[in-house]
Image (cartoon, rainbow, N blue to C red):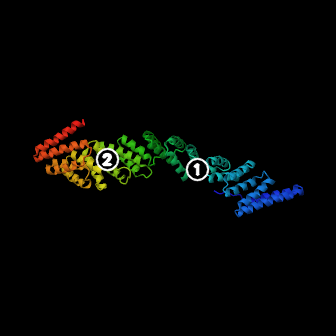
């Protein structure tokens, strides 16, 4: 910001000074006083038309007559600054403060120089002085701490200002930048705990602390904080996280579902916490299948999740538990949402089809995937396996032989290809080739060990 001193202020000061001199000094010194005033007004005139060199010359004459006049040095500083002679400007403003340290505008002149030259470290000393005049300059000090990467001091001052005058968008942005560096999070956690103790009805302090604990995987502390929030503000959406956990632990399914739905619908609660809630409900439904329809509703909240395909992850959950029918259900839903061209999900689905002996649909879909991914040997394998099980041995042989061309360093898959080719030739009655492929599979198994 640009700081100026009123021209009329100088007129008043100088006129008063002239009157006093006229009343108390001998007539012999009046010409010198007149000369000072003439030079000073000349400097103002020259500065007004941006003739800074002439203005400086006039002010230098003033300083010869009155070597300890703070206003003269202040004006010199302004002219040097306008001329971009920054060090001379700084030292002129500094000289003014040495003569009169009570004038805020002299210090602001030094701050102007430091800010324009990006000398933020030196600016910090000046702003600390300006804070003695007006605490509003603490906002400037926060920015200076950020520019000099003194993040611990910036965080401390941000929290102080937030506590005294409330939050601001700029300070919250700075705070986010600081807390993205994990080493400052402990200080912020301590601050938030203190804020909660002082202001137990302010929800934002709880939510900020829960978020930090969750990001650090300190789930127990996050839950403990949520329970404190629940006790203080029972209507809080964040409090429903703790209530959900309580209801699940006590097998109160309907109440747990109500709390879960409030959490999942909330725009305030981040996705990581929502995913954890859904995972806990999934485990709960596994032993309480009467709530399966509520699980489907819960999943719908994640339809637009850009980070995690929730439906697919639930399919994997049942896959790992070897609950193949449920895995199939969620894999098929995933592929329906993704137009069926998800490579990994198709492979997982085909394994689940194999486990549930759904060979007719497996044969149909694996053959279709060969058309979409013609260089993926896994799809040829599943098509061959399914056709063997359906006693379509010729189709199985054709698929498997085509797929063999795309096997590169996949030992387990190569073993399975040979076994299925042996089965296909056995079904076709070519026992010589049957033995050939079974022997190849045995040899690969021995080498694998």
Q: Where residue 314 is drawn, which disc sits there?
A: 2
User: Taking 296 as reference, is 167 left or right?
Assistant: right
Position of the N terminus by quadrant: bottom right
Answer yes or no: is residue 294 visible: no
Looking at the picture, tell me which residue is in the foreground, 210 or 355: 355
Q: Going by the picture, which residue comes out furthest to the bottom?
A: 49
Residue at image position (76%, 57%) is 59
User: Taking 52 as reference, is 419 left or right?
Assistant: left
Percent coordinates x, y for residue 147 in the rendering: 57, 49
Answer yes or no: is residue 410 visible: yes
Percent coordinates x, y for residue 206 in the rendering: 49, 45
Q: Where residue 143 is drawn, which disc sits there?
A: 1
Percent coordinates x, y for residue 131 in the rendering: 65, 48
Looking at the picture, tell me which residue is in the foreground, 71 or 280: 71
Mark 2 surroundings: few (<14), some (14-19) or many (≥20) residues within 10 A: many
User: Taking 368 as reference, is 135 left or right?
Assistant: right
Q: Which element type, helix, strand or loop, lies under badge 2? A: helix
- Give the spatial CA distance, label 1 vs label 2: 47 Å
Mark 1 surroundings: few (<14), some (14-19) or many (≥20) residues within 10 A: some
Residue at image position (13%, 43%) is 434
Q: Earlier in the sequence, mark 1 or mark 2?
A: 1
Q: Nearer the viewer, mark 1 or mark 2?
A: 1
Percent coordinates x, y for residue 135 in the rendering: 64, 49
User: Taking 448 as reference, is 388 left or right?
Assistant: left
């Amino acid at each position: 910001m640009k700081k100026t001193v009123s021209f009329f202020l100088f007129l008043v000061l100088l006129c008063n000074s002239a009157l006093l001199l006229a009343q108390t000094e001998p007539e012999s010194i009046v010409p010198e006083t007149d000369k000072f005033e003439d030079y000073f007004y000349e400097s103002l005139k020259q500065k007004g038309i941006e003739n800074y060199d002439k203005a400086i010359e006039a002010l230098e004459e003033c300083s010869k007559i009155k070597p300890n006049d703070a206003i003269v040095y202040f004006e010199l500083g302004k002219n040097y600054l306008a001329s971009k002679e920054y060090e001379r400007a700084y030292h002129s403003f500094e000289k003014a403060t040495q003569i009169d340290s009570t004038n805020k505008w002299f210090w602001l002149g030094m701050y102007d120089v430091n800010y324009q030259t990006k000398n933020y470290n030196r600016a910090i000393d000046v702003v600390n002085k300006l804070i003695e005049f007006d605490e509003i300059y603490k906002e400037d000090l926060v920015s200076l701490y950020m520019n000099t990467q003194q993040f611990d001091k910036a965080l401390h001052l941000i929290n102080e200002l937030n506590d005294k005058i409330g939050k601001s968008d700029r300070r919250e942005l700075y705070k986010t930048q600081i807390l993205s560096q994990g080493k400052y999070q402990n200080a912020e956690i301590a601050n938030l705990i203190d804020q909660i103790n002082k202001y137990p009805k302010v929800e934002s302090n709880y939510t900020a602390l829960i978020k930090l604990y969750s990001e650090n995987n300190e789930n127990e502390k996050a839950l403990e904080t949520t329970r404190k929030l629940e006790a203080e503000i029972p209507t809080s959406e964040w409090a429903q996280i703790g209530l959900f956990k309580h209801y699940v632990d006590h097998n109160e399914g309907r109440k747990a579902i109500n709390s879960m739905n409030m959490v999942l619908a909330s725009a305030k609660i981040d996705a990581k916490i929502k995913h954890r809630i859904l995972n806990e409900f999934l485990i709960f439904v596994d032993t309480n299948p009467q709530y399966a329809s509520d699980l489907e509703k819960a999943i719908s909240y994640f339809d637009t999740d850009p980070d995690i395909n929730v439906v697919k992850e639930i399919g994997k959950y049942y896959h790992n538990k070897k609950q193949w029918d449920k895995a199939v259900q969620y894999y098929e839903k995933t592929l329906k949402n993704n137009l069926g061209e998800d490579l990994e999900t198709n492979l997982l689905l085909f394994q689940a089809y194999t486990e549930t002996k759904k060979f007719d649909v497996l044969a149909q879909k694996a053959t279709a995937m060969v058309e979409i991914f013609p260089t993926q040997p896994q799809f040829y394998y599943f098509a061959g396996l399914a056709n063997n099980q359906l006693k379509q041995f010729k189709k199985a042989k054709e698929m498997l032989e085509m797929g063999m061309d795309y096997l590169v360093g996949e030992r387990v898959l190569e073993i399975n290809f040979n076994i299925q080719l042996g089965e296909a030739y056995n079904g076709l009655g070519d026992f010589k080739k049957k033995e050939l492929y079974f022997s190849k599979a045995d040899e690969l198994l021995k080498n694998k060990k």
